[in-house]
Image (spheres, rainbow, N blue to C red):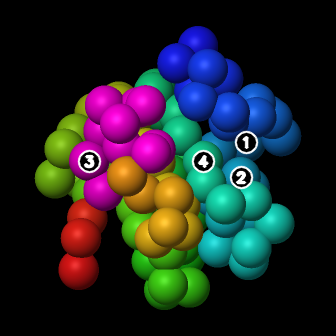
Amino acid sequence: DAALAHGFEHRRAGSTAIQLCWVADGRCDGFATLQCSSWDALAGLILVEEAGGMATDFVQDHGLLGKGGAIACTPALAPQLEAVSGLRLQHR
């Protein structure tokens, strides 16, 4: 609930993949999940990066078969989302 205390909204579309696509196309400024699988997140994380956003390196952090957290956002939101989630974004 630290995210809510920092002014973040909670929305859930039912799919990590679709929510990452929403970040990539600008519908949302950021997305965080603390538990997902690689097949739920990898394509969306790449889309966010290709659109100019920032994303976690899921494979480096959890491998292809592991489960863990993933975040993606606009560069302006990166410091706040990292602080609230405890996850690290790739800085390129």
Residue 15: assigned label: 1
Q: Earlier in the sequence, mark 3 or mark 2?
A: 2
Front in this rendered view, residue 50 or 5? 5
- Magenta residues span 80-89
The residue at 30%/56% (across/down) is 89
C-alpha span from label 3 to label 2: 19 Å
Mark in front: 4 vs 2? 4
Identify the element where label 4 is drawn: strand
Q: Real-space Cα distance between discs 1 and 4?
A: 11 Å
Tag 4 or tag 1, which sits nearer the N-term?
1
Q: Which mark is residue 88?
A: 3
Q: Which mark is residue 31?
A: 4
Which label sits in the foreground, 1 or 4? 4
Three-letter code, disc 1: Ser
Residue 71 at x, y percent in the picture: 46, 48
Q: Name the outermost residue toward the left.
A: 60
Q: Nearer the viewer, residue 75 or 23?
A: 75
Task: Of the two numbered discs 1 and 3 on the same chain, state the one appearing first in sequence.
Answer: 1
Q: Which residue is mark 2?
A: 19
Q: Residue furthest top?
A: 1
The chief SS type of the magenta part is helix
Q: Quadrant of the C terminus?
A: bottom left
Are circles 4 and 3 on residues that touch, CB within 8 Å? no
Q: Quadrant of the image for the N terminus?
A: top right
User: Do the CB atoms of the residues marked 4 and 2 lie less than 8 Å apart?
Assistant: yes
Q: Name the amino acid type tagged 4.
A: Phe
Could you tell me which residue is drawn at 22 percent across and 39 percent down? 62
